[in-house]
Image (tube, grey):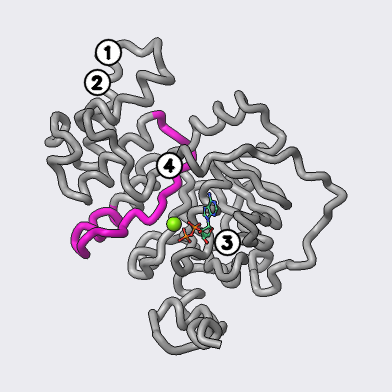
Amino acid sequence: MKAEAEERNDPIPSSLGPSSLDPSCSDSSNPGPSSPDGAPVIELIDVHKNLSGLWVLRGVDIKVFPRETMVIIGRSGTGKSVTLRHIVGLMGPDRGEVRVLGRNLAALSARKLEELRLRIGFLFQSGALINWFTIRENVALPLLEHRRHMKAAEVEKRVLEKLRLVEMEGAVNKYPAQISGGMKKRGGLARAIILEPEVILYDEPTSGLDPVMAATINELVVHTRDALGVTQVVVTHDMESAYRIADRIAMLYEGKIIALGTPEEIKKHPDPIVQQFITGSSKGPITDKNNE
Ligand SMILES: Nc1ncnc2c1ncn2[C@@H]1O[C@H](COP(=O)(O)OP(=O)(O)O)[C@@H](O)[C@H]1O
Ligand SMILES: [Mg+2]
């Protein structure tokens, strides 16, 4: 979290109005076959972000509905992690609005933002376990910090319950260095859900894993949604994983969502940029553009 955590901006003046860079290809207003209902749990409205002089996000619009798993795909360096950081309030938009669990993040005080963050679990790319703590200690940490009244026996019960959910009961006393990459991710997930969040964000949960381990993590993402009834956003460039876990997929390209739909809709998407990305082809508009 540290270095990327930056000051959030003041509330966005409403006079700024909609952007001239509206994503024309986004079809979020066109409900697909799995059209979700209820108010969105997460809503990014015309989000723009400039980092070190570069407009990384140029009008991102996205809505994630209750109990939905939204997968954001896109090449490396397109702003997927930056988008996740906006959802958890580690970064604020230069323009546009981020709404999570009914609140405009920019309008919250630091304390209210902190409270809201406790309702969001974040699985970092690395798993982010602390090396000198056992798995049990790592998973218990948020409880010790934020649920100080909780009795030791209750903490233990909750920790074991979450470790069971990620099939890690056998590794409670191990240190991160003693377990595989896939187990570290599962331990990280147990820690991300220990406070029983309503939203879970995953940054590249299958990256660096072998295909078998990646498949296990995919199952777990689906299982977590079903078991806990949470709303999830998963960022990945792994299409196999995206198809396996997504209710809907959004493709981020040059700072905007250029395609949004169910896995079936994305597979059939007419945009050649989308097709090149999802088929992993070396030839097409993405590479032509970069070679210009
Ligand atoms: N804290 C930061 N300060 C400056 N530039 C950043 C910061 N975080 C990300 N970037 C830049 O924003 C772009 C998108 O990064 P990122 O969201 O990490 O991409 P990815 O889609 O691979 O997750 C990259 O060009 C990256 O260098
Ligand atoms: Mg990233």
Q: Nearer the viewer, residue 168 or 277?
A: 277
Which numbered dot is residue 127? none
- For disc 4, the marked residue is 122
- For disc 2, the marked residue is 156
Quadrant occupied by the N terminus: top left
Which numbered dot is residue 35? 3
Q: Nearer the viewer, residue 7 or 67?
A: 7
- For disc 1, the marked residue is 152
Name the residue rendered at 46%, 49% in the picture: 232
277 in relation to 189, above or below: below
Name the residue rendered at 24%, 20% in the picture: 156
203 in relation to 195, above or below: below
Residue type indicated by callout 3? Ser
For numbered disc 1, what is the local secondary structure? helix
Name the residue rendered at 67%, 27% in the picture: 109
Q: Are circles 1 and 2 on residues that touch, CB within 8 Å? A: yes
Alpha carbon separation for disc pair 1 and 2: 6 Å
Mark closest to the chain's N terminus, 2 or 4: 4
Q: Position of residue 168 (x, y in %)?
A: 19, 39
Question: Does the magenta segment cover residue 121?
Answer: no
Alpha carbon separation for disc pair 3 and 4: 26 Å
Mark closest to the chain's N terminus, 1 or 4: 4
Mark 3, mark 2: which one is toward the viewer?
Answer: 2
Residue type indicated by callout 4? Phe
Mark closest to the chain's N terminus, 3 or 1: 3
